[in-house]
Image (spheres, helix red, strand yellow):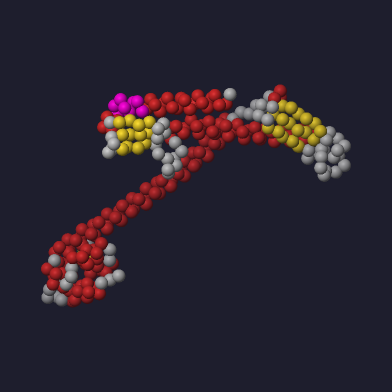
Amino acid sequence: MRSPLLWNIFRGFWARRDVVPARRHLSCGNLPLEELFARGGPLRTFLERQVGSEAQLQVRRPELVAAARLLSDKEQELQETQHLLHDENEDLRKLAENEITSCEKEIAQLKQQINLVINPKDLRIDIKRASGAGGQHVNTTDSAVRIVHLPTGIVSECQQERSQLKNKDMAMKKLRAKLYSLQLEEETSKRYNARKIQIGTKGRSEKIRTYNFPQNRVTDHRINKSLHDLETFMQGEYLLDELVQSLKDYANYESLVEIISKK
């Protein structure tokens, strides 16, 4: 809220032409001090703390002019900073969009790389009579087809058509789609696990490395390893090599566990 006392002081101060013959003497850039005061902000706070009467205002006029210029410069810097932050946020948004596009392209390429081959020896095909509502052919002909993929245990059935061949063809298409989806998921998971040790999950709460200067310690949270002597580490000497080697060993361990778990 505006202070009536200070506002009246300013109005009276500007009205006294004999004290201040030209208003431009108290201007800051293109804005006079009166207008800056009316806008509030840091200049108003400064005046409320420093000026208590019209006499003090006249005595401290040069100091107030300098303060006005300084605060105006600070406001300009703040505007430039906000502009830079806006540009940075825009760059981050574009980067996120590019990453999403890259992921979509990678998945598209991965789909093209998958070559699904179904060995007939891995299939068990059962023929049975259709069940449920379906007309005269239900329970009269062996038209329903059930296909089991033995290595994965995936089952595909079809009894929509009266023809056994059509039902078999449709069941095979369903089975192929299920196996393709399973293989795509496995390949995507494999790539994700391979990159996880390198880039992490990119979560906001994810910690990668902590530099504790008071305790002279650096901790890598990916492998839960702590090293001391920050100065040596920051200079890229043997401690950095030790940490890099530990990360490589951990990556090899993760790959070995993944291979064993699939067998």
Q: Quadrant of the N terminus?
A: bottom left
Percent x, y for residue 31?
A: 24, 65
Percent x, y for residue 157?
A: 74, 36
Percent x, y for residue 146?
A: 76, 33
Q: Which residue is depicted at the point 27% across and 38% down?
A: 214
Left or right: 44, with 19 as reference point: right
Q: Quadrant of the C terminus?
A: top right
Q: Which residue is depicted at the point 30% across and 53% down?
A: 80
Left or right: 45, with 153 as reference point: left
Residue sitting nearer the eye, 183 or 69: 183
Left or right: 101, with 218 as reference point: right
Residue 240 part of the magenta-drawn span:
yes
Left or right: 131, with 238 as reference point: right
Answer whether residue 112 is visible to the viewer in this image: no
Q: Which residue is depicted at the point 49% across and 42% down?
A: 100
Quadrant of residue 167 within the rendered picture: top right
Q: Which residue is depicted at the point 72% across and 34% down?
A: 156
Residue 245 position (above or below residue 67): above
Tell me the magenta residue range.
234-243
Residue 59 position (above or below residue 204): below
Percent x, y for residue 234?
A: 29, 32
Magenta span: predominant SS is: helix
Residue 41 position (above or below residue 247): below
Residue 128 part of the magenta-drawn span:
no
> Which residue reaches farthest front?
215
Residue sitting nearer the eye, 202 or 78: 202
